[in-house]
Image (cartoon, rainbow, N blue to C red):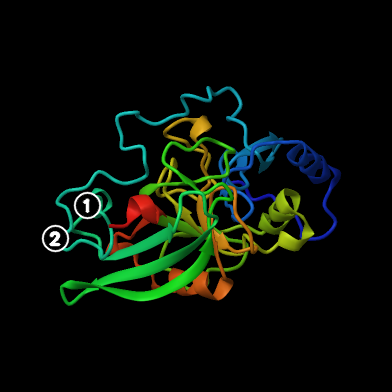
Amino acid sequence: MSNGVYRRAGLPALLACALLVTACGADADGSTDDSGSVESAGFAAPAQQTSFGDFAAPAQDSPTGSDSASTSTDQSEDQSGTEATGPVHPVPVPGLTKEFADQIPAETSQVLVATSPTADSEKSSLSFYEFTDEKWKKLKTFDTHNGSNGWLKDRREGDKTTPIGVFTLSDAGGFKANPGTELPYTQDNRLPSSATVAYGANYESVFDYIIAIDYNRKPGTAPTDKTRPMGWDKGGGIWLHLDHDSGTNGCVTLDEADLKWIMRTIDPDAHPRIAMGPATELKK
């Protein structure tokens, strides 16, 4: 893991250059709201990014020397981010259609459900369910934002939609120290500079805490790992991260206190999943 440091104040000329490129139309998919981690090939800011040496600002291009359509991993694997599973959970999560309920395996005992009334909405809600005493109990519901262009199953890099589906939740990170989550946590003190380059000075703290949603990524790696099993054009870097009061480039965002509660409550041994999409598809 590389460990170069960028400070909150006094951004170098390199970062200013990255900001200019971003402002000129670089693709930023898992952006306006995500934190990141360091990876072996250099730093990767949210979702799509353009690389400048060791720093990768939003609008990520495919890695140097790689084909946008074929970026690692065996295409025979389940590419949605949902692990291949055994038996379906015997008790469906309340309100989910059979298509989505059948993607929750018997081993899972924590499920987050993110949904909006319509497919084009950027405002959403996120409910946390836990399976106890042979039934699903809703612990809390939070106000959230999703992609500024709503939800889409066949999303593309930079289209500002949040992917529809059921995904695992396996890794977390952020600029600040681990707030108490049992998920593997990668702390990176360059995230404020990344957020500032991506979204301006008012957004330097949106990557303080992150949970990676396993859409088109390799579980078990830092949230900013650049591996894209479905290819670069499908985007990546889709996270739960801190809200900025508007639609995102693909992530789901919520208030700091809410995200920290989720991070402290989520249990890797519960094999947690998140089901995401508009009520028109997700709900009965």
Q: Is residue 177 above or below residue 276?
A: below
Residue on which disc 2 sits:
90
SS under mark 1:
helix
User: Can residue 167 be seen by looking at this rendering?
Assistant: no
Residue, disc 1: 98
- Comparing 78 with 245, the one in front is 245
Of 92 and 47, which appears nearest the observer?
A: 92
Q: Quadrant of the C terminus?
A: bottom left
Q: Tell me what residue is drawn at x 42 percent, y 59 percent.
A: 115
Q: Position of residue 226 (x, y in %)?
A: 53, 39
Q: Position of residue 174 (x, y in %)?
A: 58, 61
What residue appears at the point 40 percent right and 47 percent down from the top-left corner? 164
Q: Position of residue 271 (x, y in %)?
A: 29, 59
Whether residue 121 is visible, yes or no, is yes
- The front one of 284 and 266 is 284
Label 2 sits on a secondary structure element that is loop
Residue 270: % across, % down: 28, 64
